[in-house]
Image: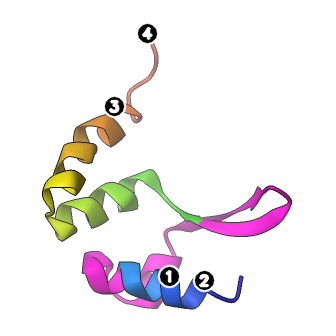
Amino acid sequence: MTQLPSILAALANSGGGTYDSLLAHTELLQVFGHPCRVVSLDRLIMLKRAAGRPKDLEAIAELESLRRPLA
């Protein structure tokens, strides 16, 4: 996880606030046997809104659909 601080810092600088505030919205998961911090769905949506790029804005509706329970 040596790159984690720089990755979170880049996300924080894109509208997520400070490194510490972004870190508070992550969860530690095991990915292929390695610990990996993953930002929460709500925070990811917020980051994409803050970035404002067309591809990010297009992804928001799909990400928000993940919040709804399956019928």
Crowd rating for badge 4 (residues with CA inside 10 Å; few <14, some 14–19, many 20+): few
**Whether residue 43 is situated above or below residue 11 in the rendered picture:** above
Which label sits in the foreground, 4 or 1?
1
Q: Residue at (46%, 17%) from the top-left corner?
A: 70
Q: Residue at (62%, 86%) from the top-left corner?
A: 3
Q: Residue at (41%, 34%) from the top-left corner?
A: 66
Name the amino acid, label 1: Ile
Distance (Cα) linking label 3 and label 1:
26 Å
Name the amino acid, label 3: Ser
Q: Is residue 25 magenta?
A: yes
Residue occupied by mark 3: 65
Q: Is residue 50 left or right of residue 35?
A: left
Q: Secondary structure at mark 4?
A: loop
Q: Are marks 3 and 1 in contact (CB under 8 Å)?
A: no
Which label sits in the foreground, 2 or 3?
2
Specify the label residue 71 is tagged with: 4
Residue occupied by mark 1: 7
Distance (Cα) linking label 2 and label 3:
28 Å
Name the amino acid, label 2: Leu
48 or 23: nearer the viewer: 48
Q: Are marks 2 and 3 in contact (CB under 8 Å)?
A: no
The tag earlier along the polypeptide, 4 or 1, is 1
Q: Is residue 22 left or right of residue 51?
A: right
Q: Is residue 25 left or right of residue 16?
A: right
Residue occupied by mark 2: 4
